[in-house]
Image (cartoon, rainbow, N blue to C red):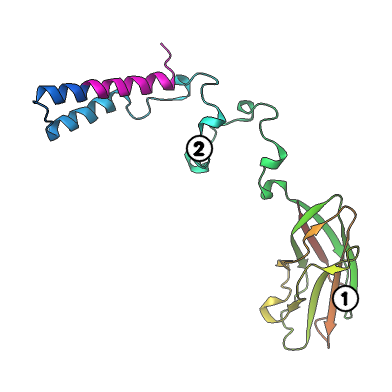
Amino acid sequence: MRRTLRDIVVMSCFLWLIITLLGTFGQGGRRRPADYERMQQAIRGVLPSGSIGSAEIEDGSVASADIASGTIETGDIKDGTIASADIADGTVAPGDATTALKTKTSITQITLAQADQQKYVFVAPYACTISQISLVSDTATTSDAGTTNWTFQIANLTQTNDLLSSAYVGTNSAGLAADTVLDLSPNTNLTLTANDVLEFQATANNTPTDLTGAEIITVVEYY
């Protein structure tokens, strides 16, 4: 016979009450330590490990309101336990998705010379938030140091503000390494409105590594 979770809990409580009363009156109102052990064993016998599975819980008997926030974590759910067929249409709303799931990527190829450069790299398709902007180059600039270097900035031309509170300075190990992602990590003015235009600005200080002919892409992550 199929038992609901409520039935099992009620049976456990009832059995615990009977054992408690028998222990009390059978020993003149005093319970010995052994009585407690027998009580625990009896209750464990009613609810042995693994006794409650999905088959014992009727459909609809547990609603989201019955589960306290944070009670179930990712580690509590075995791989493959929940399939797409188990989630009803409309159960998960767009606002329930994490930032990682909602993040999109826009990639633009740019060319630079050994001089100051400004390149369009992104147009906001809708109101969104920038989470990261990165560069990838096939040419390294790690030999640049001191006052001889490239500095990078991302400007919102529509809102006339910058996305980095101070320009990124590419010196020594902080410069471009060949075929390696360089995160610019924008930290201000990250919220865009639809059709905002972002521009990548590269400034050559003195005579840094010549990037003429280098293959460079900008990667804009947003949500």
Which numbered circle lies on residue 198?
Answer: none
Left or right: where 48 falls relative to 91: left
Which numbered circle lies on residue 212?
Answer: 1
Whether 161 is drawn above or below 142: the answer is above
Which segment did they paint magenta? 1-18
Label whose residue precedes the other's in the sequence (2 or 1): 2
Left or right: where 29 falls relative to 114: left
Q: Give the mark toward the camera: 2 or 1.
A: 2
Type of amino acid under label 2:
Ala
The answer for how far apart the CA atoms under marks 2 and 1 are is 59 Å
Residue 91: x and y in percent read 66, 31
Residue 152: x and y in percent read 80, 74
Whether 115 is drawn above or below 138: the answer is below
Question: In the image, what residue occupies the spot 67% across and 78% down?
Answer: 173
Left or right: where 221 falls relative to 123: left
Whether 113 is drawn above or below 65: the answer is below
Q: Nearer the viewer, residue 18 or 149?
A: 18
Left or right: where 116 falls relative to 3: right
Which numbered circle lies on residue 68?
Answer: 2
Type of amino acid under label 1:
Thr
Q: Nearer the viewer, residue 8 or 176?
A: 8
The part of the image, by quadrant, that contains residue 220 is: bottom right
Q: Nearer the viewer, residue 125 or 215?
A: 125
- Magenta: predominant secondary structure element? helix
Question: In the image, what residue occupies the spot 81% across and 55% down?
Answer: 106
